[in-house]
Image: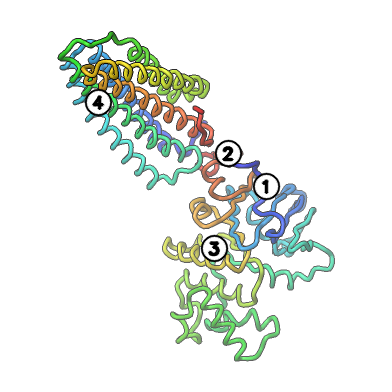
Amino acid sequence: MYNPRASFENQLKELERLLLEMGRAAETMLEHALEALAQRDVDLANDTIASDDKVDYLKLEIESKSMELIATQQPAAKDLRRIFGAIQIASDVERVADYSVNICESAIKLADKPLFKPLIDIPRMEQVVVKMLKESLEGFVDRDLELIEQMILDDEEVDNLYESLYDELCEFMKKDPSLVDQAVELVLISRHLERIADHITNIGERVYYVETGIFTELHQ
Amino acid sequence: MEEGRSENSSGNGKDEKIRVEKFNLYYGDFRALKDIETSFKKNAITAVIGPSGCGKSTFLRSINRMNDTVQGVSTRGQILLDGENIYGPDVDVIWLRSRVGMVFQRPVVFPLSIFDNVACAPRVQGITGSAVLSDIVEESLKAVDLWDDLKGRLEQPALSLSLGNQQKLCIARTISIEPDVILFDEPCSALDPVATLRIEELMWALREEYTIVIVTHNMQQAARASDHTVFMLDGQLIEAGPTNKVFTKPEDFRTEKYITGKLA
């Protein structure tokens, strides 16, 4: 069907392509950060930290493209929500990348000594968080609100894992203060994963808003 | 935060200045307006938007019965001004138009002086005292922000003014007889962007005292310069609501298509 705004539509699609590229870059960073932690791989951690520049660059590009479209195209209704949503999602994706950098920094600190306990809950959190990020991007690309609503339910599991791990690590530290250095890093990593899950939840809510025009807290 | 149910109304209850009930207008057999139901709020600007030929100007002209003189026009339904049907048998159309003024697409300036262009409306109403007329002209020109510029040359021909100032002069003439409602029919389509913004600012100032309805094909103007928006298509009212809602989250897919420029 003839669309009198075909070139504007193409620019919106380009904006969303950039956003997906940024999301995929953050997803790779998160996966590599967790691999660096598990494998005690300092080089991989350093490379991952360096790749944050690309995510920051893409965020700036999305923001400047969005400003340009607002200034030149007078977007309204869903077109406007798509641009507004892109700016917000880019901001959440950037935070996911920043927390991945923080996990890499902890991974580097933990790499020089064997861990006092095997990693169990953190890999489980990782699994859920990576799945959430993949699904949020898939939901964004396919406009799949059902997937988004399902994805957001997983945030609950991440919160529960964080709380139990926090309690467990505190107990370790109380019993044996020599474990504090390592335990604090593990608390921080789990905290970063918990925050990443919150930002992914935000992404889901932004996608929901773009599609429906309704601002809502999908995760209660 | 989900908003409440959409109503085909830009006003309600005691704030309502004009209520339109099942209003239809026919040009001969052609039904140009179909069962229009809406209302216009006091001290607010309502923009009527829609593609060419959707009936928006016909609708606007129905509010002060400007269509009466068009051959073959007939109407059904009613338009109530402060509760009184303006299509009732006892309504004096001259009285109606003194309460519901109109500003047209191109400034309708008479080949008279600036002063007489404004004073002619109160004169038609029987006001002849020169002091009273001078006061009215001064107040009217002040209201449209022309007084300081023009007070020293009121006897000059009005046609010597810029188009933007001619349009302001027409607005001054409209308000010189203190109507309740001002209808603007594409008031800026002949004006440059700066003059356009000046007229929009003026409308914002005037809404403190008047009920304003503006027909515009400029969607950005409707978005910028109105409190409520009514969208029409093929003689029907499709959607009416607060402007900020209509332009961010319209209810009807046809409104969405129109305001995003995709109504082919």
Instruction: Say which of marks 2 and 1 sits in front.
Output: 2
What secondary structure is marked by label 2?
loop
Spot occupied by residue A129 in the image (x, y as percentages of width and height): 38, 19
What secondary structure is marked by label 3?
loop
- How many numbered discs, if any? 4
**Disc 1 to disc 4: CB gap under 8 Å:** no
Mark toward the start of the polypeptide (3 vs 2): 2
Mark toward the start of the polypeptide (2 vs 1): 2
Spot occupied by residue B43 in the image (x, y as percentages of width and height): 61, 63
Picture quadrant where residue B226 is located: bottom right
Position of B219 relative to B185 (above/below): above
Residue, far right: B89
The CA span between labels 4 and 2 is 37 Å
Instruction: Say which of marks 3 and 2 sits in front.
Output: 2
Nearest to the observer: residue A66 or residue A30: A30
Position of A154 relative to B63 (above/below): above
The residue tagged 2 is B2
**Disc 4 to disc 2: CB gap under 8 Å:** no
Whether discs 4 and 2 lie on one chain: the answer is no
Q: Which residue is drawn at 51% across and 24% down?
A: A145
Q: Residue at x 34, y 29 (%)?
A: A93
The residue tagged 4 is A101
Is any part of residue B140 visible from this angle? Answer: yes
Query: Which quadrant, please, contains the N terminus of chain B?
Result: top right
The residue tagged 1 is B8
The residue tagged 3 is B187
**Disc 3 to disc 2: CB gap under 8 Å:** no
Spot occupied by residue A54 in the image (x, y as percentages of width and height): 24, 29
